[in-house]
Amino acid sequence: MNRLVAALLLVLYIGTATELPQLAKVPMLVLHFLEHAERDHLTLGEFLHEHYMRGDVYDADRARDLQLPFKVELPGAWSIAASVPPQPSADLHQFASPLERSFLRDIPLLAGIKTSIWHPPAA
């Protein structure tokens, strides 16, 4: 059951957060290349250069060009950002005075703040 859920989540992620669904447009690339090869006698290199290296070209078959892979962004793409919480580098209580220790103990939200910020900077 866990493998099934993991596989489902992987497919969901790949299908929505990556550009992999652009590969579903590859048959359109082949058909459009065959049209150009027959009509304009283009080689594959010339076709790829014309459609991907020259930027946006507004020609007679622009609507067809926009159906090619990686020409327009597919809707629904999103990204996942993960962050690792910082690890405390040292125990605050070993550097704090008794008064500061009681202060830090009473307010748990301040437990991650270094006690050196309570002192004026050294000259």
Image (cartoon, rainbow, N blue to C red):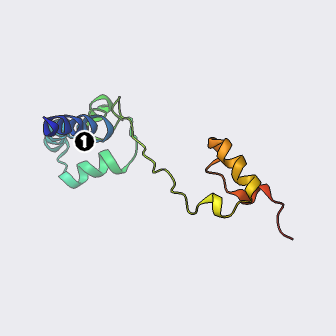
**Observer-nearest of 108 and 54:** 108
Callout 1, which amino acid?
Answer: Leu
Estimate the x, y position of residue 2 in percent, counting from the top left.
16, 38
Q: How many marks?
A: 1
Rate crowding at label 1 as few (under 14), some (14 to 19) or many (20 or more) other CA atoms within 10 Å: few
Residue farthest along the right direction in this orientation:
123
Estimate the x, y position of residue 92 in percent, counting from the top left.
63, 58
Which corner quadrant of the image does residue 16 belong to?
A: top left
**Observer-nearest of 35 and 121:** 121
Image check: 58 left or right of 24?
A: right
Image check: 23 left or right of 108?
A: left
Residue 32 visible in the snapshot: no
**Observer-nearest of 41 and 69:** 69
Q: Secondary structure at mark 1?
A: helix
Estimate the x, y position of residue 10 in percent, counting from the top left.
22, 40
**Observer-nearest of 13 and 116:** 116
Give the labeled residue for mark 1.
Answer: 20
Residue at coordinates 65% horizontally, 47% vertically from top-left?
Answer: 105
Residue farthest along the bottom direction in this orientation:
123
Looking at the image, is 19 positioned above or below residue 62? below
Estimate the x, y position of residue 87 in percent, counting from the top left.
51, 57
Looking at the image, is 75 positioned above or below residue 83? above
Looking at the image, is 86 positioned above or below residue 55? below
Residue at coordinates 82% horizontally, 64% vertically from top-left?
Answer: 121
- Image quarter (top left, top right, bottom left or bottom right) of the N terminus: top left
Which corner quadrant of the image does residue 65 belong to?
A: top left
- Image quarter (top left, top right, bottom left or bottom right) of the C terminus: bottom right
Residue 116 visible in the snapshot: yes
